[in-house]
């Protein structure tokens, strides 16, 4: 079985932002996301893999036998866009997208150019809803 590449690391989050994010607006947005996601999740930010900033964790196990740990919510300030890892494929979350703002949907994440393009109140609802979903369906750090 292949080993999961996205594991929690000991790299300080601010060191990552200061060395990796070269766009001033993306740096401001990243710091705002850290503040907001910390508040919404109740967890401090941690690096997951080389570029994902995650909050809390949960354990997943697929029918195939593949299992691992992942952040409950998170983001990555990539060059082209900020990748938001906040989406659980539920009817409620699908409705949230209607009022979310300007974004593109990926397979496992939502891409936004900058935070001012989206509705932060809807982002909060998505994050809280995702944490609740993970708590119901997985072994989740949010239970502690």
Image (cartoon, rainbow, N blue to C red):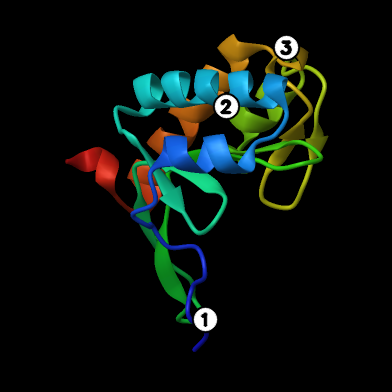
Asked whether the viewer can see residue 63, the reply is: yes
Q: Earlier in the sequence, mark 3 or mark 2?
A: 2
Q: Position of residue 38 (x, y in %)?
A: 37, 26
| Marks 3,2: beta carbons within 8 A | no
Q: Horizontal placement of 39 versus 53: left or right?
A: left
Using the rendered view, name the quadrant where residue 19 is placed: top right
- Please tell me which residue is depicted at 57% across the width and 10% down the height of the picture: 121
- The answer to which of 100 and 32 lies nearer the viewer is 32
Is residue 120 placed above or below 65 in the rendered structure?
A: above
Q: CA distance from mark 3 to mark 2?
A: 12 Å
Question: Mark 2 against mark 1, which lies toward the viewer?
Answer: 2
Residue drawn at (70%, 34%) of the image: 22
**At numbered mark 2, what does the secondary structure look like: helix, strand or loop?**
helix
Bin the neighbour count of mark 2 within 10 Å (Cα to Cα): few under 14, some 14-19, many 20 and up.
many
Is residue 88 something that shows in the picture?
Answer: no
Q: Can you tell which mark lies on residue 64?
A: 1
**Residue designated by label 3:** 116
Query: Residue 69: x percent and y percent?
Result: 39, 61
Disc 3 and disc 1: Cα gap in Å?
40 Å
């Amino acid at each position: 079985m292949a080993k999961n590449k996205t594991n929690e690391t000991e790299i300080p989050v601010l060191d990552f932002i200061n060395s990796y994010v070269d766009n001033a607006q993306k740096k401001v947005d990243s710091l705002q996301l850290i503040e907001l996601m910390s508040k919404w999740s109740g967890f401090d930010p941690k690096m997951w893999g080389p570029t994902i900033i995650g909050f809390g964790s949960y354990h997943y196990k697929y029918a195939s036998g593949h299992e691992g740990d992942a952040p409950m919510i998170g983001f990555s300030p990539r060059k082209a866009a900020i990748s938001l890892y906040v989406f659980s494929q539920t009817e409620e979350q699908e409705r949230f997208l209607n009022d979310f703002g300007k974004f593109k949907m990926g397979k496992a994440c939502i891409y936004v150019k900058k935070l001012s393009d989206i509705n932060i109140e809807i982002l909060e609802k998505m994050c809280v809803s995702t944490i609740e979903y993970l708590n119901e369906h997985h072994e989740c750090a949010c239970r502690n």
